[in-house]
Amino acid sequence: MGFPTEFNSVCKFKSDQELYELLEYGRGKMVKSGFRVYPTGQKVIAYTPDNRAIAIVKIVASIAEINFQGEEVTEVEMELVRRLTDEESRIQTALAHEMFFGEQS
């Protein structure tokens, strides 16, 4: 392919508001800085701003653009598949810390 993707960090929410909208309404979006390629059509794990696994989401759109301030941004739209159970969240969170976020303290 040649393009880097964001398979594991695509749904690492930086904003509690973006996460709340996804969980409350079943659909949501997040904005990331820079042009990125996201796995549209695939299901991924969503993480809270404090790196806790919370849900499975499906990526439905990825739009890269230059906004009115001249910044490169990518908007990712997603729909909620389901929330994780407490056990699933604990296991996925531990795996993510080991693989992507650094060791848990």
Image (tube, rainbow, N blue to C red):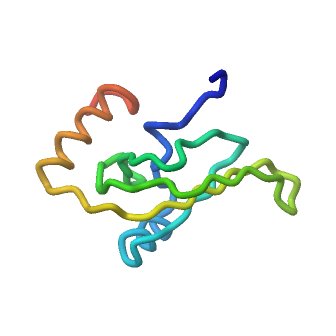
Mark count: 0
Tell me the residue at 66%/40% (across/down): 36
Q: Is residue 59 above or below residue 102?
A: below
Q: Is residue 37 visible?
A: yes
Tell me the residue at 55%/64% (across/down): 29
Q: Is residue 2 above or below residue 81?
A: above
Tell me the residue at 45%/73% (across/down): 21
Outermost residue, bottom direction? 25
Give x and y (percent) for residue 83.
26, 61
Q: Is residue 105 visible?
A: no
The one nearer the camera, 26 or 67, is 26
The one nearer the camera, 61 or 64, is 61
Outermost residue, top direction? 2
Tell me the residue at 72%/43% (across/down): 34
Q: Please indicate whether residue 68 sits to the left or right of residue 14 in the image.
A: right
Q: Please indicate whether residue 82 sits to the left or right of residue 66 in the image.
A: left
Which corner quadrant holds the N terminus?
Answer: top right
Give x and y (percent) for residue 63.
69, 54
Give x and y (percent) for residue 60.
53, 58
Give x and y (percent) for residue 7.
47, 37
Q: Please indicate whether residue 1 sits to the left or right of residue 53 in the image.
A: right
Which corner quadrant holds the C terminus?
Answer: top left
